[in-house]
């Protein structure tokens, strides 16, 4: 392939993709070739989330994560750990004490042990961790109303970062969230990040997830967010990039939103029309023109999936055939790849 079209050869930041340990037994040679050829780094899509890796207080399920790390090392790909605290994939046992609500101290002890166990087990093999995922409220108030806030308090965030830092003082630590480019949520995020900094929390970067939709990419707000977060002295990462081409309800990237799709609403089941792919290419190019302009602020851009067939958008917020990434189901480059390369050269 023309080196102009190799992401890691022309990106001024790291080129990443997400994949799950549970996918590995089924990856094809073409997929492995695509990963090795195009990308520097992968993010663990699910296998390091608490519900997967630590389903019961005394039960850890490391097999999928171990396999992912072995695979990444064999193929010369770095690994980002995702994620230590996320209300959506946090098992109930964290908050339970023999049928009664666990005390704040007990929950924090469990969190500390959870974080120490993961960071120490994979020390030297994971290049950075998303410490807290999606703690900011979508509307209205400041933090999302979760069991973490209710049962521990707003300082669960600084505790999580503190525990990660004490477990591995060298480890790069990130805060990660969706829609934090949009003005209201951006203000709340700035408030949180400044608060964490004022408490002396070690935090290296903020991850803007980047689950955007065709014709609705908030380009100006994205640029403002990159500038504003960087002004706090943080690196900026785009951590879960995709451009959905199928209409979806206004639900941000909230994984709890579900929708029953009927086949009629699966418009690109056979294939994606060339004019849609072209539009998607233009919008990806415009996005990467912004990232390129701010290249000294951005350290990594990660796509949420290796290719269209492995994108979560085929299942969320309902089952449909999506075409959100740079490579198609046969691992072939889509028009977006050449458009991005052209805009960055
Ligand atoms: C998604 C995975 O891609 C799916 O396989 C899983 O079923 C649900 O979670 N924001 C995040 C990611 O931070 O962890 C989510 O990943 C997508 C939205």
Image (cartoon, grey):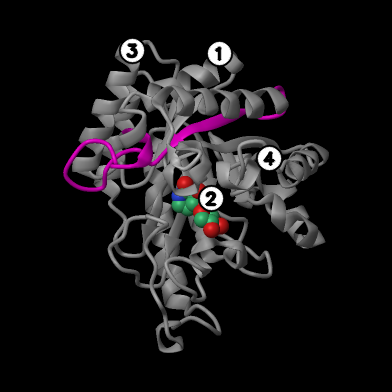
Inspect this view and state whether residue 338 appears: no
Circle 4 residue: 59
* Precedes in sequence: disc 1 or disc 2: 1
* Precedes in sequence: disc 2 or disc 3: 3
| Residue 144 lies in the magenta-colored region | yes
Could you tell me how far apart the alpha carbons at marks 1 and 2 are, in whole angstroms?
Answer: 30 Å
Q: Are marks 2 and 3 in contact (CB under 8 Å)?
A: no
Circle 2 residue: 303
Q: Position of residue 115 (x, y in %)?
A: 57, 27
Q: Nearer the viewer, mark 2 or mark 4?
A: 4
Q: Are marks 1 and 2 in contact (CB under 8 Å)?
A: no
- Looking at the rendered structure, the secondary structure element under dot 3 is loop
Circle 1 residue: 166
* Precedes in sequence: disc 3 or disc 1: 1
Quarter placement of the N terminus: bottom right
Above-or-below relation of 306 to 195:
below
Circle 3 residue: 199
Inspect this view and state whether residue 202 appears: yes
């Amino acid at each position: 392939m023309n080196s102009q079209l190799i992401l890691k050869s022309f990106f001024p930041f790291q080129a990443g993709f997400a994949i799950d340990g549970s996918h590995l037994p089924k990856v094809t040679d073409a997929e492995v070739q695509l990963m090795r050829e195009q990308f520097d780094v992968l993010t663990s899509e699910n296998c390091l989330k608490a519900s997967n890796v630590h389903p019961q207080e005394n039960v850890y399920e490391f097999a999928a994560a171990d396999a992912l790390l072995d695979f990444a090392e064999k193929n010369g790909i770095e690994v980002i750990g995702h994620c230590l605290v996320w209300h959506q994939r946090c098992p109930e046992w964290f908050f339970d004490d023999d049928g009664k609500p666990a005390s704040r101290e007990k929950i924090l002890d469990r969190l500390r042990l959870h974080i120490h166990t993961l960071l120490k087990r994979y020390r030297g093999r994971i290049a950075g961790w998303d410490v807290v995922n999606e703690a900011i409220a979508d509307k209205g108030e400041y933090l999302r109303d979760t069991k973490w806030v209710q049962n521990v308090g707003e300082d669960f965030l600084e505790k999580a970062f503190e525990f990660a830092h004490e477990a591995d003082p060298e480890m790069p630590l990130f805060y990660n969230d969706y829609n934090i480019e949009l003005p209201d949520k951006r203000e709340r995020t700035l408030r949180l990040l400044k608060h964490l900094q004022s408490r002396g929390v070690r935090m290296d970067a903020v991850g803007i997830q980047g689950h955007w939709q065709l014709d609705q990419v908030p380009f100006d707000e994205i640029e403002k967010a990159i500038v504003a977060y960087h002004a706090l002295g943080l690196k900026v990462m785009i951590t879960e990039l995709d451009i959905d081409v199928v209409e979806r309800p206004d639900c941000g990237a909230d994984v709890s939103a579900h929708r029953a799709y009927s086949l009629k609403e699966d418009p690109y089941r056979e294939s994606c029309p060339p004019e849609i792919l072209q539009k998607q290419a233009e919008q990806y190019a415009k996005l990467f023109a912004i990232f390129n302009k701010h290249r000294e602020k951005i350290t990594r851009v990660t796509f949420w999936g290796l290719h269209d067939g492995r994108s979560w958008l085929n299942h969320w917020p309902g089952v449909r055939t999506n075409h959100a990434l740079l490579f198609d189901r046969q691992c072939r480059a889509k028009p977006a790849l050449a458009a991005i390369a052209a805009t960055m050269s």
